[in-house]
Each structure stands twice: as structure tokens, then as C-alpha cells.
Image: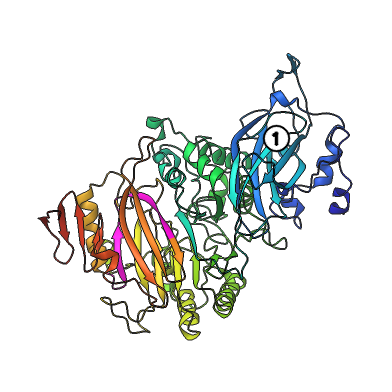
Amino acid sequence: MQFPLLLLLSLASSASASWSKNLNYRSPSTHHPALGIAIHKVVKRNEPGSSYPASTLNFTHGVASGDPYPQSVILWTRVAPQSDNSQSNKTVSGYAPLFDHDNEKYVKISKAPICVEYKIAADRDLTKVADSGTVFTSSDVDFTVKVEATNLEAYTTYYYQFSVCNSNNKSPLGRTKTTPNADDDITKVSIAVYSCANYPFGFFNAYGNTVRKDSVDYVVHLGDYIYEYKNGYYGWGDSMGRIPLPNKEIFSLYDYRKRIATYRTDLDLLASHQQFPWIPVWDDHEVADNTYRDGAAELNNTEDSFMKDGGISVDQRKMNAVRAYYEWIPIRQVDMDDNLRIWRSFSIGKLVDLLMLDTRQYDRSITDLYWNTDYIHKISDDAGRSLMGSRQENWFYRKLSESAERGATWRIVGSQIIFSRIDLEPFKGTKNPLNYDTWDGYQSNRNRTLHHLYSNEINNNIFLAGDSHASWVSDLVWLGEKDYNSSTGAGGIGVEFAGSAVTSPCPYGENITLANANNFSRIIESSNTELQWQDLYYRGYFELHFTHDDVQANFFGMPDIRTKNAWEIPLANFTVKSGANRLQRPVAGGVVESGSLKFGKVVQNNLTLDTDNGTWFVSHPN
């Protein structure tokens, strides 16, 4: 058996160090060792007394924290003898000689673990220690360290740091924050919401702006943390010195490790991870484009697909991606009986319940793969289709009911893809007017969700989405089943906030002009009854600020992502009053900076766009 051995394992040089406390040795699932690591074999392979000199090791990618609970949080770092990622999960060998600065000589150590200490405290000087420990890492997990810090106080800010054992070689100092207890009556909480960061398309300025403002408690990431494409196929990073490595479409475990590591060289992404606890979930590009349970676009276990991918099957590619994700992202393994489960929930006091879904990888029925759009259109309302699979779907409905029963004020649903109907007929024509890779392709699944909310009178629902590289704000309604008044919002059951990308390009072209983008937004907004605001032009993010009385949503746009900068434009501000189940009118106060606002105006540099008739006129400040 694996884990009885773990309790006894140590090396002579660090008798108290633990293998099992480094959670990445259990990734992605301890119950499926063929998909991961047989830890007893790793321990047996290592040479007793062998270790890397501390001076040859570096904390190559900073620190991170995530998945906060009231009494614990996940801490992460990477400490390695080299910046490159491990080519193997079995042995450490073939490295060039390493220079030991302490003893001023070159050494070559093979099959050696690295001993790492961690400490978390209530003060920056790390004197009020709440938890500490000693763990091992090695090439088997790409030299990453992921530990669960425990014995913490609820809703408290902490500081943490890693160090190489018995040395002064320390990581940067990280900051994190636990969540309140589920029955704590907190008065406010704030989160930043991000998605779709494509490295060769620009700098991740959006991540850094919340750090510079120190404006939120937690970061929610809705996926597309990385993209699997090669440079040139999707982006032009060479012009900005941002070539995603390896510079090819990625398939192997090393490829996915290297790609995430490249993204984690962006200084604003490093800063966000260092200062805020993240609550992340994957979308499709963490594995491949338009993934579903059995494949992805251009990746469907056919002979042609198998040869194209260098002999790597769909399942193996997915496991490579999943394993690298768990190694590098500060996320918990939710259910050890289910190695691909990432859907999970967080209770943030009595104020908020956050449900993070997996609408891409877990058990999604076949999606739009570009060549089968007509077929998906025909079956889009088939009752047997599910975005989540029956296990996750039933968990989702149960959690919504439990949240309402316990009296949580707000329910946040983190969904990768847009939930509300989006009719794109003016652009796509009448044959296939919807985007069938979103909830529109799984209309019965959406109807079941809405039926559960309406029939059980579950109110104050805030749905989140990313994926589309554009901003969409809608009243959450069951069109065709419930009466809905677009001007007042009456008939809604909540609100959906879908955010733009950190850098990924506008769906109507990276180089679209502001005028053309806003014109397209006006056509889309006017074609969709529940859609209240839409913006195509700006890359960015949004913040949500919760109290028991209302939610304030603030959308920000990045005016320039081709250079590293701290600029941002407040695009639109929205209010949702508790119990109203709709956007407060006038929506966004009647004025936004960009896009198209139903029954409102767009004001840019003293020019105003009347979205009712699409005409511009000169406006004068008061």
C-alpha cells in the first residue's frame, strides 16, 4: 500500500521532511497511480544522503496561494536547479554540472530530492507562526511544491514563505487570506474575475492592476489560463518578446509544464498570485480547443488525429494537461475518487456561496467542432445533452438549494461559457444563429437549471462567464417560459456578468476599430432582449463587491496591452439590489464608456452615442 509507507519515509539528511505533504505527489489522483506517480518508487529510487547544494537552487516562478478555506489554504512554489521544466517524471539525470557557490565547485547530483521548508504567519516578519512544515520535491513533479497550510483563523490575512532546508535561500514573501466560516455574518467581500490570457497577444496588465489598487480579497479565474497553440498560428508574440514555449502546439507532459511556466514569467501574473488567493477553474485551452468528454476540435481519436498529435491519444493528452495544471496551479484535489473533478464550492460567510463549474472537460456531451455545426444545431435542445454530466449537474442543483436553505445572501456560479441566450443572427444568418459551444448548444441543460431556480424560488443568483473575449451583462431570465420586461427587468431570477479577456483578441478581429466594434455591439445588443450591455473592443476584467444589500460590478478596459503598463479605463458600473433579481435601472446609471447599452448612452471623450438610434452627438460636461 502506498500511504502507510509515506508515514515512514524520510531521507537521512532531513529526517522530518515529508513526501506526502507535497500534494503534487498525489496529483491528479491517488486512486489512479498509473495516471500519476507511484510515490514509493520515487522514494526508493532516491539516493540516501544525496541533495542539491542550496546555492544551485532557485525559486524560479515566485509563490502562489489558492482555494482558501476558513482554517486552511493551498500554498505553492517551484524550487529547481534550472529554469527549464522536467523532461521526465521518472528520473533526475542528464543535467549539466551545477556550480555550488557555497563551496566554489561544480557538482553533479542525479536522482536527488530537494528539501523545502514553509512557514505561514499573521505578520510580515513571520514571527506569529500559524503553521510550518518540511517537504520534498523532485523532477517527478517538475520541482513544484504544493502544501495545505492549516491551523489558520477564518477571514484573516496571512503571509508565507518557502526556503531551501538549512539555508538562507528563500522565496519571495507571499500574502493570502482565508475565507470566513460559513455562519460568519460578514458585511462585505470583493473578488476580481479574469479569463482568457493569451501570452503572445500582449502583456497581462489586467492581473497587476488589482494588485496595484489592492481592491479585492480573492481572485476568481474562469479558465483559459494558457493556450495550447503555437506562436504565429494564434498570436504574434515575437514582436513583443512574448513567444510561448515550446513554440509549437503542445501535447506532452513536458509541453504543458513548459507552457504554464512561460506564462508565469509575466510579472503581473506573478504579482497577482503572490498577493491574492486564487480560486481557479479550467476552460478548454488548458487542454485543447473546444474540448468535451471524448475529444476536442481536430482531436477525436481518429487515425489522422492520432498521427497529427505525434502518437498521443486524446486521453493521454488530456491527462498530460491535467497533471501539469495540478502541479502548477494552487488548487485542491477535490475528490480523490474522481481524478478529473475540478468543480467545487466555497462558502464565504453568510454573504456568498461560490459554485465553480466545469462545463468543458468533465462530462460534456459533444460540442461544436466547426465541421459538425449543422448537426449540433439540430440536437442543441436534445434532453439527453449535458454540459456537466449527471453527477456534476445533480451536485449543482443540490448546492443551489442548500445555499438558499442556509440563508446565504448571494449565489455566484462560475461558468466558463455564457449562460444567457445570445442570438447572432445578424452575423451568422438564420441557419445556425447561436454559438453552440456555449449553453446555447445545451438548451435542455440550461432549461433544467432555470427550472430549478424558478420552481424553488432561489433568488439572488449571479452567473459569471469568460471564454468569449468580450463583455456581456444580462438579466438572467427564462425566455419563452417566464414573462420578462426588458425595460424594467421584471421576471428575472438573477444577473449574468460575462467578462472580456485579459489579452485574447476580440472575436471580430484583433485590429477592429472602436467605432466598428461599438457598431457591432449595438447590433448584437438590440437583437437580444435580456442583454443590457455588450462591449467587444476592450480587453480587461471586472470586480464584484458584495454586501447584504447589493452587488456592485465594475468593468475595466485595458487601453494598451502591447506594452507593460498600469493603465485602465472604467467602462461600466452595475448594481444588483438584493431580492430584485435584475440589474438596477437605469442600467449602469444610463451611461457607459464603450460598447452598447440598452436604453442608455455611450460617452467617449465628450462624444455620446445614442444606442436607441445609433447616432453620435457632442456632449458637454456639467
Q: Is residue 348 left or right of residue 577?
A: right
Q: By what rule are the colours in the image chosen?
A: rainbow
Q: Can residue 510 be seen in this view?
A: yes
Q: Identify the element where label 1 is drawn.
A: strand
Residue matched to label 1: 163
Q: Where is residue 289 in the image (x, y as percent from the top left)?
A: 48, 52
* Residue visible at 47% across and 71% down in the picture: 548
Please give the range of residues in magenta: 528-544
* Residue visible at 58% across and 70% down in the picture: 389
Q: Where is residue 2 in the image (x, y as percent from the top left)?
A: 84, 52
Figure label count? 1
**Residue 313 magenta-drawn?**
no
Q: How crowded is mark 1: few (under 14 residues within 10 Å), some or many (20 or more)?
A: many
Q: Which of the two residues, 35 or 141, is positioned nearer the viewer here? A: 141
Q: Is residue 442 visible?
A: no
Quarter that holds the C terminus:
bottom left
Q: Which of the two residues, 499 or 410, is positioned nearer the viewer here? A: 410
* Residue visible at 76% across and 52% down in the picture: 33
Q: Position of residue 497 (x, y in %)?
A: 39, 63
| Image vertical order of residue 316 relative to residue 494, above or below | above
Q: Main secondary structure of the magenta part?
A: strand
Find the residue positioned furthest to the top: 104
Q: In which quarter of the image is residue 592?
A: bottom left
Q: What residue type is labelled 1?
A: Ser
* Residue visible at 46% across and 54% down in the picture: 192
Q: In which quarter of the image is residue 104?
A: top right
Quarter that holds the N terminus:
bottom right
Q: Is residue 155 left or right of residue 28?
A: left
Q: In which quarter of the image is residue 350?
A: bottom right
Q: Is residue 51 left or right of residue 418?
A: right
Find the residue positioned furthest to the left: 618
Q: Where is residue 372 in the image (x, y as percent from the top left)?
A: 43, 62
